[in-house]
Structure formats: C-alpha cells, structure tokens
Amino acid sequence: MNTSIISRARKQFHADLTSSDGPLCLLKDGDQFCMASNADRSQTTSKAVSLSNAKQLGAAPRLSKPQGQTMGKLFEQAVRDFLQTCLPHLYHVRPGPWRVANVGENRREDQLAKYYPYRHLDDLAHAVDENPGLLAVLGNLYMVSPDVLVIRDALSDDAINKTENVVDGFSATYSPVRATNVPASSNSEPAFIHAVISCKWTMRSDRAQNTRSEALNLIRNRKGRTPHIVAVTAEPSISRIASIALGTGDIDTTYHFALPELITAVKETCNDEALLMLDTLVTGDRLRDISDLPIDLAI
C-alpha cells in the first residue's frame, strides 16, 4: 500500500522542523542532552516529554536553539507549507481555489480586512485613526493578528456556469461569492477567509488567553459566516495544552504537531494525571493531530 499524500506531507512537515535550521532540536541542561527546544526548563515533565517527542521525530542535538521569535516564525512557515501541500488534493471534497498565507510576519497591516467577512474592519480602523476617542469605546475588540490564513477566492461567472447556466444578470446579484458582485473600486479582494490558524510553538497562560480572545473577536466582528478558527501547537506540557484546548465557544479544535508521538511520550512518564487529561482532550474532540487539520478544513 502506497503512503498517502497526507502521511508524506506530515513526514516532510516534521523534517522541516527538525532540519539543521529548523526550530526543533535536542538541548543540554547541564552535561546531558535531556530536553528539546520546545521544553520548559523549569518543568521536569515538560523536559522528559519534549525529549521523547523530539527523538521520535528524528531531532538532532544542538548547542543552542534559535531565538524565540525565530522558532515561532519557522513553525508558522512549516504549518503553511503543510497545508499548501495537502489542500489541493482535497478539491474533490471541497472545491477551491484555495490559498494559504503566512501573515504572521506582517502585523502592521490588517490582513483580515482584505477579505470577507472582515473587510469592514479597515473602515473601522480608519475611523479610530481619525477619532482616537473611539478607542476608549471599542478597545481592541476589532484587533486580531492571525498567523496563517486559508483563503478561498470568489468565483467568476464562467466557473459558476461551467456545467450549466446557474447565474445571470437578474439573480444572485449581491452575494460576494460571485466575483462580479464585488465593486472594482473596492480595496478588498473578491475572496473569503475560510480558516484562521493560530500557531503557537509553545503555550503559556497569556498566549492561551490571547488566542481565545482573538477567536472571540473573530466571531463577534464577522459580517457573514464564521471561518474555521483553530490553534496548532508544539507544546509538550499537557496542562498547558489544556489551557487552550479545553472548553467550547471560541477555538474549533486544537491540533498538536505530533499527537501520536506525544501520547507515547506521556505514557513513558507514567504521569497518571497527564495521561488522564490527554485522554480527556483526545476523546472529547478537543485535541487532534496536525494530519487531521486538512481533512477538517474540507468541511
């Protein structure tokens, strides 16, 4: 049986992360290589789980790890590349065209405001610039800084009418799904945000809270259907994963960059509390593997 496209893409995803310039490596704490670059040095379990996880993925020893922000950027790029590889092969399940954009490096510009259902946020930002007093009322409720976006282009009439005459000049004249309905003078692209992906190399309580707050802002501020809102993390600590994965109402699902390997690593620690929480997250549909993400996005 041939290896599947997603399995090959997952393997390449991990190869990118463990490459000589990737973010995942084995590090010393003292004289021994006893943890990975995503571990918390102050937590014994985090060090043990990260080490096992990284070894299973083929990570190599290094004397030092990349800087924190660099690791986050490399992780975002790897997630983007993984989705770019997988999604085109799901067009028969969820027709495209799709684009995957890593926008985490360009936070000075409002990336969401370029696309439906958030193009009105650009007008709101201009209004705040012209009248700073509005900020006291709005706060930061309209501000979201995504890492990776999955974008679906609007359709031309030729594409919609490919097999039969579905639309004409008398009907469906308002829906932006139809590219001809988007004014040529519009600053936004005739495209939609299908998914907003928050990439967290590691999780701390403040990062979990920020991700949840941004998810709620995405839900509140849309003018149209809510996109998929997911988080992808390489965090080895189960309690920290739980800080973002537990509960409903904001994040669709949290995805671990190597869930089967994480399960093996946690079992090796014989930490019953961590094992119970991990089982709760997985069986409760709150935590999945990165390889599940392309399939879930096809819904």
Image (spheres, helix red, strand yellow):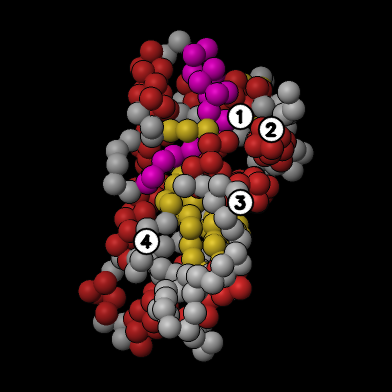
- Tags 4 and 1 touching, CB below 8 Å: no
Label 4: how many residues lie within 10 Å, few (<14), some (14-19) or many (20+)?
A: few
The answer to if 252 sits in the magenta stretch is: yes
Left or right of 205 on screen, residue 262: right
Name the amino acid type tagged 3.
Answer: Tyr
In 3D space, how far apart are the residues under numbered discs 3 and 2 (Cα atoms)?
16 Å
Quarter of the image for residue 217 reads: bottom left
Name the amino acid type tagged 1.
Answer: Ala
Label 3: how many residues lie within 10 Å, few (<14), some (14-19) or many (20+)?
A: few
Left or right of 157 on screen, residue 129: left
Which structural element holds mark 1? strand
> Which residue bears the numbered disc 1?
36
Where 168 falls versus 261 (above or below)? Answer: below
- Tags 4 and 2 touching, CB below 8 Å: no
> Which residue bears the numbered disc 2?
4
Can the viewer see residue 207? yes
> Which residue bears the numbered disc 4?
225
Which badge, 4 or 2, is on the more N-terminal residue? Answer: 2
Left or right of 204 on screen, residue 156: right
Residue 50 in the image, given as x and y percentages of width and height: 56, 26
Quarter of the image for residue 275 reads: top left
* Most distant residue in the left direction: 137
In 3D space, how far apart are the residues under numbered discs 3 and 1 (Cα atoms)?
37 Å
